[in-house]
Image (cartoon, helix red, strand yellow):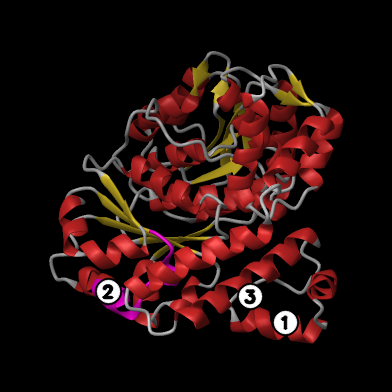
């Protein structure tokens, strides 16, 4: 097997570090800082694998992936980038890249990826969209989010149904919208929650013809709705549109096995904010600047507070808090005092009244859909929400979460299993 690798990186220090790591692993390594030189050398067959950074001076190498795959369709390309967005991962996948690694990466991971690339027949490049295509702003540098981005990149090249799961407010609908945009479908993306799905049914499918249908909150679908969606997916001619679904962590146990298997042919798991580390500050500053329509940053103490807070309301809570600060007129740096005021306002509504109102809306919707046991469904959702909130406030430590709930650790473990939430390693 060939071990010849060409490294395209304009940072001299990083180029040297990568080259040394690959050389120590037994690869025959050469390097360059020029995209044109890299493509010419690959065309001359100086190497059999290209490892390329994205931003190289004034050039974006993703814009030249098509040229690269045209001159060397047999040579895999590994993309490395500090642009830690879903758009970068998706563009890399749609451009025919073998794999995408976000910076900073572990050199062992790079070596392993290079080994896989040179032992695997690269797939033929998929049809590509312009690198200027717009994507919704999914952001993240954490390993959990980078894995979600890699999955979105792979799914952008196929047309299977996709299930996006995660806590309420974690960005699962945004992931589905991002994927639909990346697939380049010309038709509309029609969205529907359980109530609309129950009442409109075939009308929704007709409205989404040639585009996509995003079906939300799968854990709340009645048996009749589940049967209808499964029937759509099993039609010999197909549903006539791309199907996306979103659901909470309990969605798998709430759906029939046959429906889950069909919907989750493509599955992207959106991690809770508490598992994203520094991403919470990245998200906060993004939504601050978006709402203020100018660059706004967190000072050191505010950043620490954002990263340390559990964000039980997920990304949706970050958006609300950041927007609340921005509309107060902050145009430069946000302090921890600004943040405390925003979070205090977030929790100012009487929790008991808020829960009662939400329960009334849920009961009305579920009974209107013909549910035979709305009280049991509500109790299950509340139990799951209580446990997720306790885990968020406890940093994911089950022992502490159980104490907050007034439970012992074994009881909490049984409830997690019953609710379909027991998919993490112990503590």
Q: Tell me whether the residue at label 3 lies in contact with that at label 2, contact meaning CB atoms closer than 8 angstroms.
A: no
Q: Is residue 301 magenta?
A: no
Q: What secondary structure is marked by label 2?
A: helix
Q: What secondary structure is marked by label 1?
A: helix
Residue sitting farthest toward the top = 58
Image position of 172 (left or right of 209): right
Q: Which residue is mark 1?
A: 413
Residue 271: image x %, image y %?
Answer: 61, 56
Image position of 119 (left or right of 343): left
Image position of 137 (left or right of 404): left
- Quadrant (top left/top right/bottom left/bottom right) for the C terminus: bottom right
Q: Which residue is mark 2?
A: 230
Which badge, 3 or 2, comes first in the chain's sequence?
2
Other residues around mark 1 within 10 Å, as few (<14) / some (14–19) / many (≥20): some
Q: Which residues are magenta?
A: 216-228
Q: Nearer the viewer, residue 17 or 402?
A: 402
Q: Tell me whether the residue at label 2 lies in contact with that at label 1, contact meaning CB atoms closer than 8 angstroms.
A: no
Q: Nearer the viewer, residue 218 or 31?
A: 218
Does residue 255 sit above or below 364 in this rendering?
Answer: below
Give the CA separation, mark 3 to mark 2.
28 Å
Does residue 5 sit above or below 380 in this rendering?
Answer: above
Q: Which residue is mark 3?
A: 383
Find residue 274 and report its image quarter.
bottom right
Mark yes or no: residue 37 visible: no
Q: Nearer the viewer, residue 142 or 370?
A: 370
Give the label, 3 or 2, closer to the camera. Answer: 3
Instruction: Please tell me which residue is depicted at 58% across the width and 60% down the height of the picture.
Output: 167
Give the CA separation, mark 2 to mark 1.
32 Å
């Amino acid at each position: 097997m060939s071990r010849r690798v060409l490294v395209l990186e304009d940072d001299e220090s990083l180029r040297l570090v990568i080259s040394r790591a690959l050389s120590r692993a037994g690869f025959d390594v050469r390097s360059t800082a020029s995209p044109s030189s890299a493509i010419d050398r690959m065309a001359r067959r100086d190497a059999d694998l290209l490892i390329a950074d994205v931003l190289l001076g004034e050039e974006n190498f993703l814009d030249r992936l098509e040229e690269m795959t045209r001159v060397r369709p047999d040579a895999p390309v590994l993309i490395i980038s500090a642009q830690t967005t879903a758009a970068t991962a998706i563009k890399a996948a749609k451009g025919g890249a073998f794999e995408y690694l976000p910076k900073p990466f572990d050199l062992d991971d790079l070596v392993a990826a290079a080994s896989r690339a040179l032992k695997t027949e690269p797939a033929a490049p998929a049809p590509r969209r312009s690198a200027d295509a717009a994507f919704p702003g999914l952001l993240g540098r954490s390993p959990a989010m980078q894995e979600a981005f890699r999955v979105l990149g792979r799914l952008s090249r196929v047309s299977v149904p996709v299930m996006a799961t995660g806590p309420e407010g974690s960005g699962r609908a945004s992931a589905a919208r991002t994927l639909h945009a990346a697939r380049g479908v010309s038709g509309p993306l029609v969205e529907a929650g359980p109530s609309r799905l129950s009442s409109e049914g075939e009308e929704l499918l007709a409205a989404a013809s040639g585009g996509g249908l995003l079906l939300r909150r799968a854990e709340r679908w009645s048996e009749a709705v589940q049967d209808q969606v499964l029937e759509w997916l099993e039609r010999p001619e197909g549903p006539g549109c791309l199907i996306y679904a979103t659901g909470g962590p309990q969605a798998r146990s709430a759906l029939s096995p046959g429906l889950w298997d069909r919907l989750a042919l493509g599955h992207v798991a959106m991690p809770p904010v508490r598992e994203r580390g520094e991403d919470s500050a990245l998200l906060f500053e993004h939504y601050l600047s978006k709402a203020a329509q100018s660059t706004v940053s967190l000072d050191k103490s505010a950043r620490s507070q954002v990263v340390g807070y559990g964000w039980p309301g997920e990304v949706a809570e970050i958006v609300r808090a950041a927007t609340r600060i921005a509309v107060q007129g902050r145009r430069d740096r946000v302090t921890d005092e600004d943040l405390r005021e925003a979070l205090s306002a977030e929790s100012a509504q009487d929790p008991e009244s808020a829960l009662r109102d939400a329960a009334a809306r849920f009961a009305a919707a579920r009974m209107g859909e013909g549910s035979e046991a709305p009280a049991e469904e509500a109790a299950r959702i509340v139990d799951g929400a209580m446990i997720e909130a306790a885990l968020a406030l406890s940093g994911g430590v089950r022992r502490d979460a159980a104490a907050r709930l007034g439970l012992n650790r074994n009881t909490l473990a049984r409830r997690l299993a019953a609710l379909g939430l027991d998919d993490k390693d112990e503590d």
